[in-house]
Image (cartoon, rainbow, N blue to C red):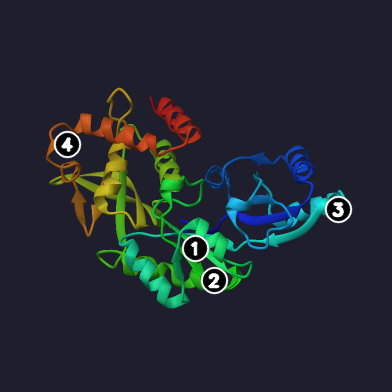
Amino acid sequence: MVFLRMGARLLFLRTEKIEELKDYIVNNLDGLVGEFEKCLEESTEDSTIIFITDIDREKTDIDDAKYIILVNQPSSILLASILSDNSSKVIHRVDLGPAFLIMRTAGDEDKVVDRLKKAYDAEVVSLREGISKGEKMDTLLALAKKSIAHELNSEDVSNNILLLSHPVNYVQKRLRSEGIVFITQSMESGEWYELRINIYDSYSNYSQHYKRLMLVLNQLELGMVLGETWTRDHALILYSVVAYQVRLFTLYSPEEVKKILLGLEYNKEGKRLVDFDLYYRNKKVSWRDVGGKKGNKNKVEQGKRYREELFEKLPDVVIENLIQLEKDIE
């Protein structure tokens, strides 16, 4: 599970030859011209967002940019390419904007913001305001409640952006050790969930079901696997069956994890493929414990509904892999 990662680096290029510089970046560095929010959504931690402005601009302000260009290269490699091609001759000045970090949160976001403000003497700003006010030795910290290992849409990131008057290397080192504490303190229970998932299949297709489970756990970054082992699941009184057990340490509640497991138990037609039994504090979490009163009447329909909800969260390539594994089982 990834709790902290870099965002795109912000690079301001001042030039009198705006069109020439834009054309060079697009044609030679595979740059993509677009709106700032779109560039941000399509960026990764290895990307650079370039703002081309005229030479009269002193501050790093998004609205001054004549062009905004996304380049999927780190800023150091990008600048090295520009220098080696002698394209730097058209650049009057280069300015770095504040570095950009993204941290995953859980629970009460306001608690996280308050604690970060006190710990880092930070200021809450909008993203555009933070870029304008921040300097190259400052850090912008964005918060997100979903997996940050992949691209994030604007609605996935909180409007509460923190401007920290510290260089990014300093902030990164501290948050790598302190970030978990901030997250845990924001959770309503103040603790993580340790869950046990028992995989049972009467046809012994344990390998395929394990692959399906891990594919989803990893893609959604549901938590950390603490251990795996064969065990006996007491399905009925005086009767036990062999099952493969995965111990999961997670931010997600047992009810949320149970919904995902139910979605994996059935195929699109409603055929049951496997039993994924979930235990929390040595108590089995029933399918009747999730979904509210409306969802507790028919387990098959409930499983099909949660399958649809699960697939909406997954990229196409993961869905294709899951469907192929289902076909291998059938």
Q: Nearer the viewer, mark 3 or mark 2?
A: 3
Q: Is residue 168 left or right of residue 204?
A: right
Q: Nearer the viewer, mark 3 or mark 4?
A: 3
Q: Is residue 229 left or right of residue 153?
A: left
Q: CA distance from mark 1 to mark 4?
A: 39 Å
Pick whichever of labels 4 and 2 is earlier in the sequence. 2
Element marked by disc 4 = helix
State the residue position of label 2: 171
Pick whichever of labels 3 and 4 is earlier in the sequence. 3
* Near-viewer residue (40 or 222): 40
Pick whichever of labels 2 and 1 is earlier in the sequence. 1
10 Å crowding of disc 3: few (<14), some (14-19), many (20+): few
* Quarter of the image where the C terminus is located: top left
State the residue position of label 3: 89
Q: Nearer the viewer, mark 2 or mark 1?
A: 1
State the residue position of label 4: 295
Q: CA distance from mark 3 to mark 1?
A: 34 Å
Residue at image coords 64%, 66%: 136
State the residue position of label 1: 141
* Near-viewer residue (24 or 319): 24
10 Å crowding of disc 2: few (<14), some (14-19), many (20+): some
Q: Amino acid at mark 2?
A: Val
Pick whichever of labels 1 and 4 is earlier in the sequence. 1
Q: Nearer the viewer, mark 3 or mark 1?
A: 3
Element marked by disc 2 = helix
Q: Amino acid at mark 4?
A: Gly
